[in-house]
Amino acid sequence: MSYPNQGPFSYGPQPHTHPNGTTILVLGILSLVVCTPLGPFAWSMGNTALREIDESGLFYDNRGSIQAGRICGIISSILLIVTVAFVVIIFAILIISGALAGGSSSF
């Protein structure tokens, strides 16, 4: 059985592959699993790649991978912002309470 999009006489536009698709997906996954600061890079690169795809008007077969990496980057960036805000708030509370300001030294 022959499928219409295979072989030298295929129908429709030939799919293209964005060169940064795999990189964006890997950065997005790594930002969730291992290293949260990679999230903004995946998010930014994903936005750029999707803009390039939309402006080209061509069919790209790895658009889903780019979107997945971008979404992972967005989630990781939000988690990074929440974590940094939490650390800053805790640090400020400790300074205000005098624990780090030298108000009660046990040495």
Image: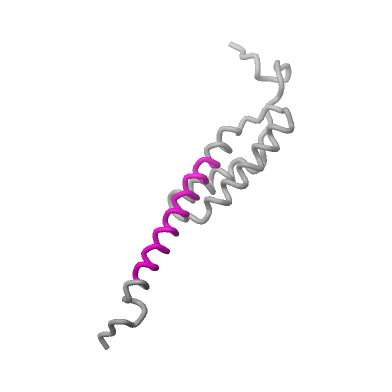
Q: Nearer the viewer, residue 71 or 101?
A: 101
Q: Residue 78: x percent and y percent? A: 47, 49
Please say if 96 is above or below 35. Answer: below
Q: Residue at x 34, y 82 (%)?
A: 102
Q: Nearer the viewer, residue 17 or 34?
A: 34
Magenta region: 69-94
Q: Residue at x 52, y 38 (%)?
A: 68
Please say if 63 is above or below 86. Answer: above
Asked if residue 38 lies in the magenta stretch, the reply is no
Which quarter shows the N terminus? top right
Instruction: Classify residue 55 by image quadrant.
Output: top right
Q: Residue at x 58, y 42 (%)?
A: 22
Q: Residue 39: x percent and y percent? A: 52, 50
Q: Nearer the viewer, residue 33 or 97?
A: 97
Which quarter shows the C terminus? bottom left
Instruction: Classify residue 51 by image quadrant.
Output: top right
Q: Nearer the viewer, residue 61 or 39?
A: 39
Dominant SS in magenta = helix
Q: Is residue 39 left or right of residue 19?
A: left
